Image (cartoon, helix red, strand yellow):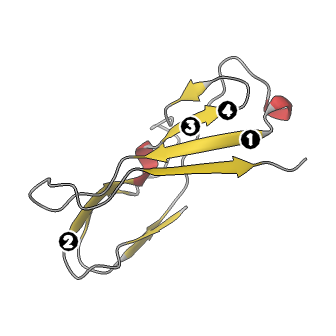
Amino acid sequence: MEVENTREEDTIFYASQATLTTNTGEQLEPDMFFSEHIDGEFIGPVTKSGSSFYILENSKAEDIESIRLIFSGASNEDWEDIGEEIDIEIELEK
């Protein structure tokens, strides 16, 4: 994923800590050992990119038809909310 701070002000956002849900009923947190660090402070208008990995526990990859990613909203350096929660649903093609 690629994350961009479009504000001049510093922003704190934890993109690689999004919760993932699947159409098979799993709710997963990213595997922090395999995932890349694209979190924390975005100093001014900058872009960070990387990958987050989720390990299925009760499903097979071929059974997943859609996923949902839920990100907590961004905050400023005083930890005040400046963004809303982001909730994205993605349909997967086979």
Residue for badge 1: 66
Labels 1 and 4: the sequence-earlier one: 4
Residue 60 found in image quarter: top right
Mark 1 is on which residue type?
A: Ser
Choose between 85 and 69: the one closer to the eye.
85
SS category of the residue bearing label 4: strand
Q: Give the Cα separation between the discs numbered 1 and 4.
A: 6 Å
Instruction: Assess whether mark 4 and mark 3 are in contact (beta carbons under 8 angstroms).
Output: yes
Q: Nearer the viewer, mark 4 or mark 2?
A: 4
Residue for badge 2: 10
The label number, if any, that marks residue 20 in the structure image? 3
Q: Give the Cα separation between the discs numbered 3 and 4.
A: 7 Å
Label 2 environment density (alpha carbons within 10 Å; few <14, some 14–19, many ≥20) = some
Q: Give the Cα separation between the discs numbered 2 and 3.
A: 27 Å
- Report whether 93 appears left or right of 88: right
Q: Give the Cα separation between the discs numbered 1 and 2.
A: 33 Å
The x, y position of residue 2, in whole percent, is 51, 67
Mark 4 is on which residue type?
A: Thr
Q: Residue at x 31, y 81 (%)?
A: 45
Label 1 environment density (alpha carbons within 10 Å; few <14, some 14–19, many ≥20) = some
Q: Is residue 25 above or below residue 51?
A: above
Q: Give the Cα separation between the discs numbered 1 and 3.
A: 10 Å
The x, y position of residue 83, in whole percent, is 31, 60
SS category of the residue bearing label 3: strand
Q: Give the Cα separation between the discs numbered 4 and 2.
A: 33 Å
